[in-house]
Amino acid sequence: MRIRTERAGDFAQIRTVVTEAMRLLPQASGTEAEIIERLRAEGALRLGLVAEEAGAVVGYLAASEARIGAESGWGLIGPLAVTPARHRQGIGRALMRAALARLRRRCKGAVLVGDPGYYARFGFRAGAGLTVGACPPRFILALPFGAEPPAGEVYHPPAFGLRQEG
Ligand SMILES: CC(C)(COP(=O)(O)OP(=O)(O)OC[C@H]1O[C@@H](n2cnc3c(N)ncnc32)[C@H](O)[C@@H]1OP(=O)(O)O)[C@@H](O)C(=O)NCCC(=O)NCCS
């Protein structure tokens, strides 16, 4: 298994992997594959990493840029998905580690909306005073690379369709 940047020839497989993985997540919207495609179309995808094995895509991680309040420069991770037959084999961890290594060079830190039960292992923590609309704060997680993030709304790119004010 290797982690590499996505190529156009991967897009159909990425859609399948993301759609199948998100079916297992009750709170998923079912639009995650479309979000990725909209990020690409908007030029907002900063990182599209695939986990590839024997020529097949078995996992995917997208990262874009978030503004927190008035402060830009935060790496926004998501969606992250691993093909269901390959869960619990370290593919999600490998994608996340590769993404954090890349974001560390160019962002103030990483933020995401996700399950703290999974993301705490990478150092993500809730409680930084971040909001994403009406999302419960325990799911809004940050991993600062230096200074703590400012408290405030984590503005997502339009591709996420969140219609955030500001
Ligand atoms: C979450 C996901 C990306 C993890 O990928 P993975 O390759 O299975 O993860 P890893 O092998 O690196 O880590 C697996 C570990 O995480 C744990 N884990 C996975 N999801 C978890 C969750 N929601 N809460 C707590 N632990 C979780 C597993 O139990 C396993 O623990 P173990 O190592 O102690 O056995 C994958 O399960 C997935 O695609 N799920 C559906 C989509 C999703 O939830 N995406 C993330 C939110 S956007």
Image: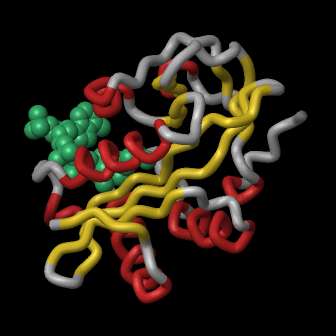
On the image, the x and y values in percent for residue 112 come to 52, 36
- Find residue 33 and report its horizontal and vertical position in percent: 52, 68
- Specify the quadrant of the image occupied by residue 164: top right
Where is residue 81? Give x, y as percent.
Answer: 35, 57
Q: Position of residue 40 (x, y in %)?
A: 63, 70
The residue positioned 76% from the left and 54% from the top of the image is: 158
In the image, taking residue 70 as reference, residue 40 lies left or right, namely left
Residue at position x 21%, y 66% in the image: 2
Q: Is residue 132 above or below residue 18?
A: above
At a point 70% along the width and 73% down the height, the residue shown is: 41
Q: Is residue 72 visible?
A: yes
Determine whether, in the image, residue 55 is placed left or right of residue 38. Answer: left
Residue 55, by quadrant, is bottom left
Left or right, residue 38 beside residue 118: right
Of the 4 image quadrants, the one containing the C terminus is: top right
Looking at the image, is 129 positioned above or below residue 135? above
Residue depicted at 34% across the width and 23% down the height: 123
- Out of 106 and 37, give the one closest to the viewer: 106
Give the colouring mode of the picture: secondary structure
Taking 69 as reference, is 51 left or right?
left
Determine whether 100 is above or below 139 in the image: below
Q: How many marks?
A: 0
Ligand 1 resides in the quarter of the picture at top left
Furthest residue to the right?
A: 166
Q: Nearer the viewer, residue 154 or 53?
A: 53
Please identify the residue farthest to the left as the structure is shown. 89
Along the line of sight, the residue nearer the viewer: 164 or 8: 8
Taking the view exactly as shown, the residue that stands out farthest to the front is 105
In the current view of this chain or complex, which residue is farthest to the bottom? 9
Specify whether residue 25 is in view. Answer: no
> Where does the N terminus fall, quadrant-wise?
bottom left
